[in-house]
Image (cartoon, helix red, strand yellow):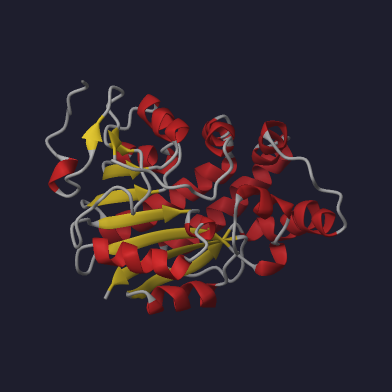
Amino acid sequence: MHQQSTQFNLQSIAPSLQLDDEGIWIPASSSSISYPEDGNSICFQVEESSYWFRHRNHLIQRVYAKYAAGTRMYDIGGGNGVVTKYLSDHGESCVLVEPGRNGALNAKRRGIESVVQSTLQDAGFLEGSIENVGLFDVVEHIEDDHSFLEDLCRYQKPSSLALITVPSLRFLWSSEDTLAGHYRRYTKKSLETVLNLTGYDMCYCTYFFSFLVAPIFLVRTLPSMIGLRRKTGLVVAKREHSTSSSMVAAVLQKATQFESARVMRGKSIGLGSSLLAVARKK
């Protein structure tokens, strides 16, 4: 049996967890999730080179450093650990909680030490036991987001934070959302409403990926509306997450720098294909 290599023992807050032979914490039982079976495998092959993941990581890290530096974060539904690894590399203490086996194994390969292969509910965390949580493109996969966030709030310590990213703007809905297992896209108002109803106060919220609203509408939404966009997979993902020319790279650099500067100053961006929020448990 693999021995735990850190001083922090997850069994102190989730007594039913056990370490398996890969050094991954596992619960007694597992529930199903709304996520494509090959989703983590596809993401794993594009995350390192993707401008999308790079920019999202950067914004998350800057916001976390401002609101929660030096505290432990639980990356719930954290996939292959791309955010956890980025925050860990910037000195933050993180635990990855990911229900998919492929994602959990990929996270271990990335060098993430504390990995729990479980849903939030199956992990068996004690109420009021966990610190800050990250939900990075997770809540849209939960059919009953209200109940999920209420459960999450109970597990968290008083005044702890939830950092959340979600896809935004209903008019950008496409076949990509359906295939990804999304139940909804949010607006700033709808996200704040569900957070307020489930035990959180919004501290900060902004749209981001403002420069992707028009391309997503033209490349994904419109073709989906007329039945032309049906193919997806690794080839499509690699194409859409890459910078195909030096001109595109230069435009993306300027756009991401603008958004980063706004977020670092605590300012909001008025429109974007994603939302980033920080909420505090009441």
- Residue 4 position (above or below residue 51): above
Q: Position of residue 77 (x, y in %)?
A: 42, 48
Instruction: Please report the residue visible at 45 percent of the width from the left and 74 percent of the height from the top.
Output: 194
- Residue 84 position (above or below residue 148): above
Q: Nearer the viewer, residue 267 or 162?
A: 162
Residue 278 visible? The answer is: no
| 98 with respect to 22 (left or right) | right
- Residue 232 position (above or below residue 261): above
Q: Quadrant of the C terminus?
A: bottom left
Q: Nearer the viewer, residue 275 or 115?
A: 115
Check the image and name the residue furthest to the front: 29
Q: Quadrant of the N terminus?
A: top left
**Res. 105 image quadrant:** top left
Residue 265 visible? The answer is: yes
Q: Nearer the viewer, residue 153 or 245?
A: 153
What is the count of numbered marks?
0
**Res. 45 image quadrant:** top right
Q: Position of residue 36 (x, y in %)?
A: 59, 42
- Residue 254 position (above or below residue 36): below
Q: Position of residue 103 (x, y in %)?
A: 45, 35
Instruction: Please report the residue visible at 29 percent of the width from the left and 63 percent of the height from the top.
Output: 161
